Amino acid sequence: MNRRTFLGSIAAATALSTARSSAIRSRRRTFHVLHPSGRFLFAINDVDNYQGLPTGFVEAFAIELRSGHLALINRQALSLSSTFPRHCAVSPDGNHMVVAAYGGGTYNVLPIQADGALGRVSQIIKEIGRGADPVKQASAHPHSVVFHPSGRFLISTDFGSDRVNVFQFENGKMIRVLQKSAAAGSGPAHIAMSADGFALTVSHELRPLVTRYYFDDRTGTITEYFNG
Amino acid sequence: MSVRIDAQDPRYSSLLKGHNLRWPASPSDAVRLIEICENTSDVVSALQRTVDAGLRPTVRSGGHCYEDFVANNPDGVLLDLSLLTSSHMPGDPGRYRISTGEQLGDAYLNLFKRHGVTIPAGSCYTVGAGGHITGGGYGLLSRLHGLTVDWLSAVDIVTIDVNGKAQLVRASKTEHADLFRACRGAGGGNFGVITAYYFDRLPVPPQEVISGGISFDWARMTEARFVDLVLKFGDYWATRGTQQDTWGLFSILNMSHDFINLSFQFCNPDGSCRDLSVLDEFLDRFEGCNGSPEHLAIQGDKVISRKPSASEACPGPHGLTRRGWLEATIEEGGGSGRERAKYKSTYMKQNFTAAEAKRIYKHMTRTGERAELKHSILAIDSFGGAINRPAMAAETSCFQRSSIMKLQFMSFWEDPAEDNGRLSWMRDFYTDLYSGEEVPARYAGTPYPGQRYEGCYINYPDSDMLAYSFWPQLYYGEGDLYPFLQDVKQRYDPHNVFHHAMSIRPKG
């Protein structure tokens, strides 16, 4: 677990308790991430219906550091069919959020405005794929997404299609670099990136497995060096 | 090879919008690419490219989708099938094909000239066969011949299979039968791209039809007269109109803030206009309603008979036109306008109650809004007849087989500044109309299928209904149909490539 995620989970606990006291109603927040400035917290709502539309949504909160109070800045719908989002990452420059929508099999990019508000989805990538497990892996399920510390790459796991993906991230756009097959039926899930950005660890959920890769930050390619 | 039109192409802006100019709602809702497909292999390759690039495809034939399901597709790809019109199959004379890009008016002309047959489909010339037929497809001949999907024998549809590959599938009663049933009433943007419809047999159109109209003056209208008129109209379809000798009669009671008129088309069940007693009897019901034959409902009609005679209907007060069916159908066919628009719909199994008619009167006469509500219309269509063969509910995905009338709420305007006023007028009207004692409290605001209503028509989709968790039941009923459609969705579009706000939702 990297530092950002760790901070995010502390903030998440704060958010949920504050939410109760300040009546910010939660639908089903499953993941939180802190903005690099520390001033904003973003929450992912793992639902398949928002305002009648078949999609999940994300929320932006302003953090008042002294009181720990959270104030809702805005809610933003994901793209149609981006259901059950479960993970997201904020670019190191703090300008973009990338959401992994597990249910709908999509990635959404959303711009983050100067006041912390989340703008409308600016890019959608729909994944097609499946894995060995006919039920749990019947279609693509983007599980986690992590920025390379340089901000120039994104690494994601696809639980449904047993893949680890690398995207280039340029001017707020994701561009596919590679789709790397992981062990069949393993369900790649969580990603941890080393602080220097030269290695990453993927944990798998359908099999007791951890895979480690070198990351080449010139080409965006990954090379497996350990699994077990 | 499809014609590929991106945002830099000078054709892009002209081809971005369909007929409802509300969509795309903003430049960021627009597609990045329009692919004009002229044949099935164009569709297969364009769709494959779209899916491989991780983009969302939406599909357009005639461009008449009422909601944002097609033209709002942020950064996606619009597959335009309007040039996919090659329908003739010279080597297969026993079978008829309609390609999805064909406009209804052209389909009528082609089928009539080549084969002397027709489809009982809609009256707007420019509506595309693609969306119209797969959503059910009804029109002036439907009381006589049923829905267009009732006649459908097979479809060609390009789906995206479990491996993400575009596959051309022929679906019929014997191959991919479930997909075929789903495409008979629920295929709009749900399962794939339909490229052709096949019919083993089709009905022969009437030799001639009589059409005409009666106008009713708002200036002389009172609430009591209005209620009387609406109930008289509804009573006919609930009683006499269910008998087979009347099935050649189709009528629409149209009303807006500045006009009320009743228009009709008639023929005998045998396609002739020899015996006009049914039409006379229908029109006689409206004597005393202060109708005026001078203001004919249908533009271009001429009064051809004002004298009673043994062979002519409607002595005296009714203006009528007797024409060949093809002329009537092609001349009346409109639908080419491009405006901002909003629509809603209701299937009715029974006549209006007086309370409902009063609520309609209230919203049609709301003061202070008349100017901005010009071209806000409620059209009450006759329904039933051959449509109401119960067996067709299980063969098709149109479950509404007990209705006697179908309502279409419409509003047309140009200035985006009127959007909110127009949308809220219609929403208020509809919500109020279905919030009386006729509707169980838990379904208030909707014509939920039950004793009186049979829900809404998916080809008149209304995104306001998404506010109700039971919206699928409004369009597909309470029975097994929606779960069936979800199952077909899972099997034929396992990755939910084809989706919009009101598409069949994956099973939870």
Image (cartoon, rainbow, N blue to C red):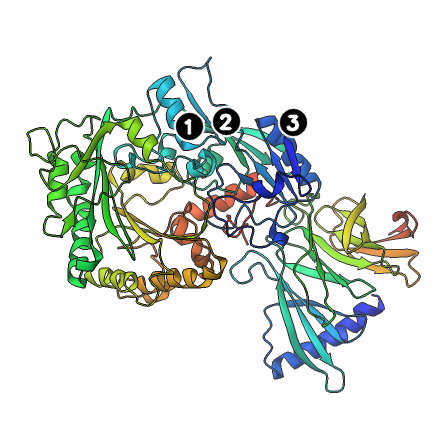
Q: Along the horizontal axis of the image, is A85 left or right of B339?
A: right
Dot placed on the residue nearer the N-terminal end, 1 or 3? 3
Residue nearest the observer in this picture, A224 or B44: B44
Secondary-structure class at tag 2: loop
> Is residue B211 shown to the viewer in this render?
yes
Residue nearest the observer in this picture, B208 or A17: B208
Residue at 37% in and 42% down: B398
Dot placed on the residue nearer the N-terminal end, 2 or 3? 3
Of marks 1 and 3, the one in the foreground: 1
Residue labelled with disc 3: B1
Instruction: Measure the alpha-carbon separation of dots 1 and 3.
Output: 24 Å
Residue nearest the observer in this picture, A184 or A156: A156
Label pair 2/3, CB-CB below 8 angstroms: no
Instruction: Measure the alpha-carbon separation of dots 2 and 3.
Output: 15 Å
Q: Quadrant of residue B50?
A: top right
Against A9, residue A139 (above or below) is above
Residue labelled with disc 2: B85
Badge 3: chain ID: B
Q: Which amino acid type is marked by label 2?
A: Thr
Instruction: Measure the alpha-carbon separation of dots 1 and 2.
Output: 9 Å
| Image coordinates for residue B38, horizontal then vertical, percent | 57, 28
> Is residue B163 shown to the viewer in this render?
no
